[in-house]
Structure formats: C-alpha cells, structure tokens
Image (cartoon, rainbow, N blue to C red):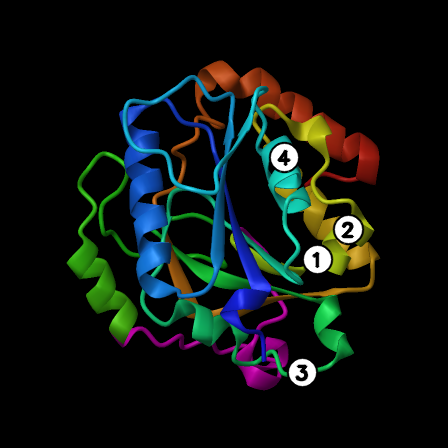
Amino acid sequence: MIRPEDVTIIIPHLGGTQESEYSLSKCFKSLVQTTSGIKIIVAYNNFQGWDGPVPENSIFIQEQGQCKAVNAAVATTNTPWVFVTNDDMVYPPGWFEKLVAPMTDGDHLRNLCVSPKRIEPRPGAPTFETYFCGGAGGDFDKQKWLDFAKNYLSMYKDVNKIMPGGLLRTGFNLPFLIHRELWDTIGGYNIAYDPWGSNSDSDLEYKIKLSGAHLYQHPNCIVYHFSQTSGTFNPENNEHYQHNFQVFKDKWGFDR
C-alpha cells in the first residue's frame, strides 16, 4: 500500500492574476484538507511577486515554464512517489485513499502511472465528465462539488478496458501519480514545450508507454478542474501552441 508519507505533491503555478491565485488557493486548501502526511510543493515559474500569502515549501523558477517548474520541484524530492497536479484542481475528501487502493505491494508498482478522472465545467475530452460547479472567476460552489463527489459512482460500461481494482486502460491526464524511478527513467518533462507547456503531457504519455510502463485512470477517484486558467489557449499564445504542435510531430512522427 502506498502511504501518504511516500508521496510528494507538485503544483506548478504561473501566477500574477486574481484568477490564477484564486485557483491556487482553492487547490492548495483542498489538498491540505483532504490529506495528512503528504508534502506539497508549489513550483512558481516566472514569479513576479504577489501580495497574498505564499505556501510553505514553495520553489521559484525565474523563467516561465510548467515543464521546468515540475522538473525542478521533483528534483528536490526524496519520496518514492510523485503526484503532479494543475493549480486549478479541487480535491474531495477520500481522493487519495481511492487512488492508491488498487495499487497493492510489489515491484510492478514502479511501472504504474495512475490518474484520477477529471470533472470539468465545460465539455472536453471523452475521458472527462462535465458538471458545472463554477470556476476561477470566483464563483466556485464548494458545497455543490462536495455533494457531487460524495455521491459519484462511475458507470463505465466498456468492460474490456476495466482492470483489476476498477482501473481503466485509458485516459492519462493531469493529475497523475508516478513512481520516482519511472520519472527519472523517462527524464521527466521535455522543456522544449515551455514556456506554455502545451503538448508536454502527450509527450510525457508516450515516453511512459515506451518505457514499458502502464497508464491507467481511476474512474471513481475524481477531481474538479476549473480548466483553461493558465492562458495556454489564449489567441495571443497561438504561436506557442502551433510551435509545440510541430515539436511533438517532428519528434514522434504523428500528430498528437
């Protein structure tokens, strides 16, 4: 069984706006309230200062880049497991226990990477679910989210993709739990996708697959994602998005 003290949570954060700081505060508070014994590191990148409080155990990267920030934060850890999350995700009580429950003892654990299922306020990827509880604009309805999470039970019907313990062979996404040895083997994130990091998760996914490790989603361990708070998909950043699309295609030989 994976214990809380075996895990470090990494939160990359590009701050400076009310929306981003609101998101981080909700994310950080939910993690503190739902876990005990887990170290949390906020990895600020392109930090320009903020009038509000800065969490303990934070690190600061001068250049902007989610990939750089996560890599740097992981390098400061000595726990056997790392959990990487966006800064705009809110966690319900019991999420950690649900996530690790199917992961029993054994060396094979080092070759597993498991993601919770994302619940988002607007339609997204087919592996996500849509349910509106507000977002980064300050309208997040915590009680609505807690009620939804308390009563949530996935009705996933593709039995061919269900593994022992209820895990699915589909849906790798942030957040994810990964063994430190596996992270070191694949070299973490590719910083070529910075400063905005688009396509870096897909790149990481294929590196994990090539290592021989297995990617799973836990359909009944859920997290609420405000989504699109970083500015990655803003029109003024389209040049970065297109550049990263080409970086991925040149590297792997196919589109994301």
Distance CA(mark 1)–CA(mark 2):
6 Å
Distance CA(mark 4)–CA(mark 2):
14 Å
- Give the percent coordinates (x, y) of residue 104: 63, 83
Q: Quadrant of the C terminus?
A: top right
Instruction: Label 1, secondary structure: give it.
Output: helix
Q: Is residue 152 above or below residue 61?
A: below
The tag earlier along the polypeptide, 4 or 1, is 4
The tag earlier along the polypeptide, 1 or 3, is 3
Residue 121 seen in this snapshot: no
Residue range of the region highlighted in magenta in the rendering: 151-174
Q: Which residue is mark 2?
A: 184
The tag earlier along the polypeptide, 3 or 4, is 4
Distance CA(mark 2)–CA(mark 3):
21 Å
Q: Which residue is mark 4?
A: 67
Q: Residue at x 32, y 32 (%)?
A: 21
Q: Which residue is mark 1?
A: 180
Badge 3, how many Cα within 10 Å: few under 14, some, many 20+?
Answer: few
- Give the percent coordinates (x, y) of residue 200: 65, 38
Query: Amino acid under label 3?
Result: Asp
Labels in figure, total: 4
